[in-house]
Amino acid sequence: AVVVLYSWLAQLSERSSRIAALLLPAVTAGWEIALVALFKQCYCRLVFEKGLAGDNSPCLVAILGVIHSFAESSRLLGLLVGAVLNEGDSWAWGSAVSFVLNIAIRQNWIRVAAARLLGCCCPRLLPLVSFSLIGQLHANVKVAFGYPRFAYPLALAFVRGRRGLQPLFTESASMCLLVCVLAE
């Protein structure tokens, strides 16, 4: 739904495509954070509080990896669709915001800011963003599970390039993919 809304906004005008490109990374990161917080609550209630024994880390890593992979894939897909639909540089705005957000998230600046904000205005929600096993596993999973999003676009670009075609349908989309790979 996020990618479809982004694609629709990107087609309206140059201004709306830039606004959509700025919002796409924040919205996908927000959904990822919300899903991880929901998963954390479910895990605590269904496993941790019931005292179930055993090593649950493989299941946790797999679920967190899927959440992160889907978030990153939808972000990349949105940028590529926008680059194909609009020959402009609106994708560059989204790529820049993604780069800054990735740095902020990897350094835990977003978590600290959210904790301070929730601590002031809604302390009851503070456990959703507090440091935990799930949060640490999520941070570690991001290193390995973010890269698979590049497999399909790179394979498509390679095959199309070998056939003498524009690698990703437009020059703008090819530049978008290159910048996203380099920014990672």
Image (cartoon, helix red, strand yellow):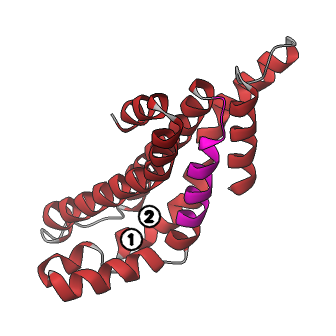
**Residues marked 2 and 1 touching at CB (< 8 Å):** yes
User: Residue 10 location, x and y as percent?
Assistant: 48, 34
- Circle number at residue 88: none
Task: Say if the magenta span includes residue 12.
Answer: no
| Residue at (30% x, 82% y) in the render | 115
* Residue at point 53%, 72% (across, down): 104
Mark 1 lies on residue: 135
Q: Secondary structure at mark 1?
A: helix
Q: Which residues are magenta?
A: 87-102
Q: Secondary structure at mark 2?
A: helix
Residue at left 46%, top 48%?
19
| Depth order, front residue of 154/26 | 26
Q: Is residue 152 above or below residue 63?
A: above
Q: Amino acid at mark 1?
A: Gly
> Which residue position holds label 2?
138
Check disc 2 and give the amino acid type.
Answer: His
